[in-house]
Image (cartoon, helix red, strand yellow):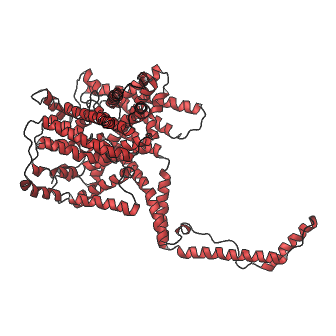
Amino acid sequence: MLTSRLPKRHWWEWLSTLPVFIILLIIIVAGNSEKLHAQLLKAGEFLWQDYFSLRGDIAKPECSINPDIEAELDKLAAEKDDLDMLFDDEPFDREAARVSLEKSRMLCVEKHQLAKNNQARVTLTVKIFRAVEKTVAAISLLTHGKHREILLLLLFIGAITCSIKQHHIAFKPVITELDQRVSAAAQLLGNILLLVSTWNYRDKVFQAQAAIDYPDIFPLLIAGFGLLSAVSFFLLIKPRSGIKSGGTVTHALLATPLYIIMALFAAKYFFLTEGHPAGVAIFFSLLIDQAGLFLNIGLYIWTGMLLKQTQLGERLFNIFKPWQMSPEVLAFVAIVVMALPTAYTGASGIIIIAMGAIVYKELRRVGARRQLALAATAMTGSAGVVLRPCLLVVLIAALNKEVVTDQLFEWGIRTFVTTIVVFWFFVFLTRQEKIRIASVRDAFPAFMLALRALIPYAVILIIVYFLYVFLLNAYLDEFSAPVILPVMVLGLVIYEKLFANDIALDNSQQESRSLEEAVRLASSEASIHIGALLLLMGLSFVLGGVVERSGLLDFFPQHFESIWLTLIFLVMILIGIGMVMDPFGAVVLVSGTVAQIAYKNGIQPVHFWMMTLVAFELGYLSPPVALNHLLTKQMVGHAEATKSMQDGSCFWYRHERILLPLITMMTTLLLVSVVPVLVREW
């Protein structure tokens, strides 16, 4: 067993990883606390009748249970006589006053008895229980309404960490000194423009003297972009040590983060064309308006990074080893297997980050050519975005009253089946060798042995799930999955690091890590990816704002002569949007623009949104951006991706990593677009 350890922790790691870890835990606790509090109240009522009266100590009443009735009557009579001297009123009724005082005394006796009974019932057990219950309630109330501030803290801590480590999403990583200087200069300019826009937005809001719903976001936005600008300036004047000298300008420009390219393009429009500098920050704040959704994305990314620290992915692929599948068969299996975690992580990019390296390695292990392995890895998340409980589908239903999640997920199953069948068809058509798979007689014993290794993982997942069901009445659906899945995967990490050290693991580096190291590394990687992805998503909203404000879509007709012309227009525009925008920002843009054109021209809403999701995935696999390919390159390594370009005996095999996903998703999009219309017309 190797004894290698993670590098010694530096002070900057405490300022990035630890705060992100704490924030993510707070989100999980807050997400569970509301359900937990409701269940605690039910349990309290079950254990102690009228528990609500025991939640607080009833103070001892100040009234006396043995008052001097006669003295009180004399006092009332004297007061009545004084009034009679001023007003001609009825004489004092002593007996009626006596009855009233007796009733008051009886009521006082009841209050004293209630307080006494309460004190008698508030035992040590009750005090402990209600202390826990009130603490959970306080946690729930503390985070309620603070989602925007928490999101901004998470975003900027991650973005600053990502900038320092130079891991922003770009066409190529920083390799040479020129790459770093050009990238840092572009980031400095872009971040300053974002800072200026935010400051201008703040001034306009306060000058309008209107009621501000969330004034706390402005200091956080200004501080965040200010710190990003400072980091960019530092990287510009002091390049990172240990990188190659030289470089070319063309390659250096490709190292510019995508979010900066979007920021510069949007700033050119809002600053120069419209003369409205605040526009960039206004549309960026749309990310903050959906804070709960994007906090869930942060949780999913952390879940993926925790999953990387386990052996679950490798053990899952181990069950396919005995079958000795040909590369094409295993590529098909990988697409199918990765669909479920894609649905639960909310977007195709997240599962590539979490499992891409494992998928690529396993495909290469069975002899898959690099181009096929890269193609399958880039596509691992493309089929699952239409399955329950994908966050993207939840966002669509939230923004469009014409559809509900049940409809979308029902159609999503059909779309998923269509995608994997089409993928298999083209993989079979372009195979370089015969499709092979071992016989059941030869493979089954080893298959069952590999399957046994998954039993502890399945048991842990089932236990955590049923604990949520029975204790919190929470099920693994699109609403609760973001706070349940991290707990499940954390349970797997704890199992491996504390109870499975004696099991021979495939990855010796993971075997050597302690529980603290594994969680720390997962949180560190999550911090980087959260910062990179959320910034990209925020600028996608801004890019959508440019398209909306420029009136670009107004140049297109609102009505078409036939439904087929409508389909052609929709397919082209949706693919174009998917090529340059993040899915969440694209959904917001399409909901208010393209969707309305589709509805007016007779396209059924569910049909339209299935087309949209497939078109988006095609866009993420298409140049010039090809986001899923960029993430795949990050996971498998730039050097390995470069080697793939030297492989292949013909045009198809030299460019298979691009062509196979493209032709698969194009065909799927054609079927999803055309078949429902043909069926309806027939």
| Above/below status of 527 relative to 113 | above
Residue 204 vs residue 52, the one in the foreground? 52
Q: Residue at x 27, y 51 (%)?
A: 518
Residue 178 percent location from the top left of the image: 27, 24
Specify whether residue 235 is in view. Answer: no
Q: Quadrant of residue 362?
A: top left
Residue 366 vs residue 437, the one in the foreground? 437
Residue 434 percent location from the top left of the image: 7, 40
In which quadrant of the rendered image does the N terminus lie?
Answer: bottom left
Residue 234 percent location from the top left of the image: 36, 31
User: Is 502 on the left or on the right of 584, as rendered?
Assistant: left
| Above/below status of 484 relative to 357 | below
Q: Residue at x 31, y 25 (%)?
A: 182
User: Is 104 on the left or on the right of 320, as rendered?
Assistant: right
Q: Residue at x 13, y 58 (%)?
A: 448
Residue 209 percent location from the top left of the image: 61, 34
Q: Quadrant of residue 254?
A: top left
| Above/below status of 317 relative to 248 | below
Q: Residue at x 20, y 57 (%)?
A: 454
In which quadrant of the rendered image does the C terminus lie?
Answer: top left
| Above/below status of 584 relative to 66 | above
Residue 369 vs residue 428, the one in the foreground? 428
User: Number of marks in the image?
Assistant: 0
Residue furthest front as drawn: 682
Specify whether residue 292 is in view. Answer: yes
Residue 329 vs residue 220, the one in the foreground? 329
